[in-house]
Amino acid sequence: MPNIKSAKKRVRLSEERRVHKKHYTTTMRTQIKRVIVAIESGDKEAATAAYTAAVPAIDSGVTKGLLHKNKAARHKSRLNSRIRAL
């Protein structure tokens, strides 16, 4: 445990930020999983609808610092190509 006052504050703030970011991370992952489930079921309309809901979640992950922009683009590209392949 830290002894210095500023170090204690850093620990407290980093824990608060971790909990706050966890909400956005789980939301983004859930949206991606919904797209994958719809793709595996073979329903193109449901997959397209889930994809349109997942894209803003992925993009907000980039703006909040959860994902690198290239990783987000890779996720979107791969999901979109799997939907087009249906």
Image: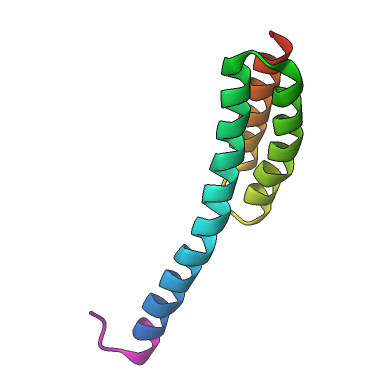
Residue nearest the viewer, comparing 26 with 21: 26
Residue at the farthest bottom position:
5
- Does any portion of residue 66 appear in the rendered image? no
Specify the quadrant of the image occupied by residue 78: top right
Residue nearest the viewer, comparing 23 with 73: 23
Counting every numbered tag in the picture gives 0
- Residue at image point 47% right, 72% down: 16
- Residue at image point 72% right, 25% down: 46
In this view, 26 is above or below 51:
below
x then y, percent, for residue 32: 59, 34
Q: Is residue 12 left or right of residue 76?
A: left
x then y, percent, for residue 55: 72, 38
Residue at the farthest left position:
1
Instruction: Tell me which colouring the rendered structure shows.
Output: rainbow
Specify the quadrant of the image occupied by residue 72: top right
Magenta residues, start to end: 1-7
Residue 2 included in the magenta stretch of the image: yes
- Does any portion of residue 72 appear in the rendered image? yes
x then y, percent, for residue 29: 54, 41
In this view, 38 is above or below 19:
above
x then y, percent, for residue 15: 41, 71
Quarter of the figure that contains the N terminus: bottom left
Residue at the farthest top position:
85
Q: Is residue 82 left or right of residue 5?
A: right
Quarter of the figure that contains the C terminus: top right
In this view, 70 is above or below 17:
above
- Residue at image point 43% right, 71% down: 14
Residue 62 included in the magenta stretch of the image: no
